[in-house]
Image (cartoon, rainbow, N blue to C red):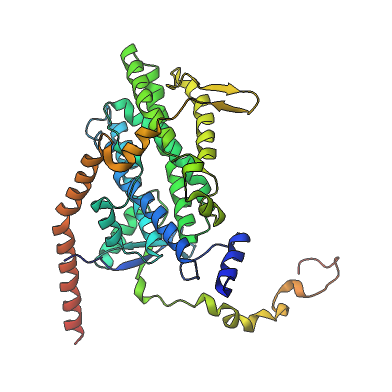
Amino acid sequence: MSTEPEVSFTNKIDQEIKIEPKDWMPEQYRKMLIRQISQHAHSEIVGMLPEGNWITRAPSLKRKATLIAKVQDEAGHGLYLYSAAETLGISRQEMLDQLHSGKAKYSSIFNYPTLTWADIGAIGWLVDGAAIMNQVPLCRSSFGPYARAMVRICKEESFHQRQGFEILLTLSRGSDAQRAMAQDALNRWWWPSVMMFGPKDDESPNTLQSMRWKIKRFSNDELRQKFIDVCAEQVKFLNLELPDEHLKWNEETRHYDFGPINWTEFWQVVNGNGPCNKQRLDARRKAHDDGQWVRDAAAAYADKKRQQQSQAAA
Amino acid sequence: MNQDWPLWEVFIRGRQGLDHKHVGSLHAADAAMAIENARDVYTRRMEGISIWVVESRNIHASNPEEASSLYDPANDKPYRHPTFYDLPEALKHM
């Protein structure tokens, strides 16, 4: 038997009425959202690291300014998402602790290294492209604060993908060495990007409930197929190749067929054994610990000002 | 000291002549820092010309569970809307 608030909650979901923080919600819905939104926030924050690596080495002032703006956006996106998660009753500190202790996950893609400048192009086109594919339907997610944060994020994210494609386009029209560098970046980033959509549907235990509650709108495999279809067409503008010999248009399904995904690698990276897992977490922890004195100083200054004000008022 | 800075709600006036609209929230040690952070987080693309910040604990909200009784007084007064009145189609500018 469903209780009265449960019925009212389910009705809202069915009628596409958004759930707001103070509305009654099942404990499992709250937990699932906290998990998904905080993971998403962590991904934005950790995602700054591989790109930050190239800010000082970007090949021109224009590329440098663009990359700084992109990394700033990612910090902003992390903050929108942390705020959305906080409306569900978890504190910022708890979420950061979960990230730094390794308890919370973030997108595995950021555990791969950025070896050349072309990687910044590949990240923009493929990684941000996959993220956008995931994020656009989340703008209609059933939880109001999450959906609103996603609207802002999607608006800002579009330049990220375009600047990445432009980097690759420029390299693909350059010297042989530049073309080879771009192809090498695609070779390394393609499969990890395809894996960004998560495990196959039949191995993704949360998907069904998440879609019933309209937190997610499409399954992992649906989004993955959509992404592959789009990229297979876009790559033609680059005169480069996606590293999949099985990639072929299928007239019957009206989709591209693609080769087998290396799920062993996927689970290895998810479980902490990717090329940069340790480096990323160490960098995050160090940044947080090194910032402690700033947080302490700001809090002490605010306290002092409050005391001065109350003395002046007395 | 391992404590979250207080939470602030951020309101932004997009253009002269518009009202301030709630855009989100952030943490800051004091009001000045909240305004600076709001500038960096919510107006990176010229989205605003004026920022308000209010500490979240100072906001009092109605309870969604009491919505039906709270709004009950307005619920049966359709005559407050212009469409309530039946007038000839030929009548213009009213």
* Residue shown at 18% from the left, 82% from the top: A312
* Residue shown at 40% from the left, 58% from the top: A34
- A200 vs A71, left or right, is right
Residue A194, picture quadrant: top left
**Residue A5, horizontal then vertical, whole percent:** 55, 73
- A26 vs A288, left or right, is right
Q: Is residue A40 visible?
A: yes
Q: How many numbered marks does the figure carry?
A: 0
**Residue B6, horizontal then vertical, whole percent:** 28, 68
A137 or A155, nearer to the observer: A137
A252 or A235, nearer to the observer: A252
- A82 vs A209, left or right, is left
* Residue shown at 44% from the left, 22% from the top: A242
A110 or A140, nearer to the observer: A110
Residue A305, picture quadrant: bottom left
Q: Residue furthest bottom?
A: A314
**Residue A306, horizontal then vertical, whole percent:** 20, 75
- A117 vs A252, left or right, is left
Where the N terminus of chain A falls, by quadrant? bottom right
Q: Is residue B50 visible?
A: no
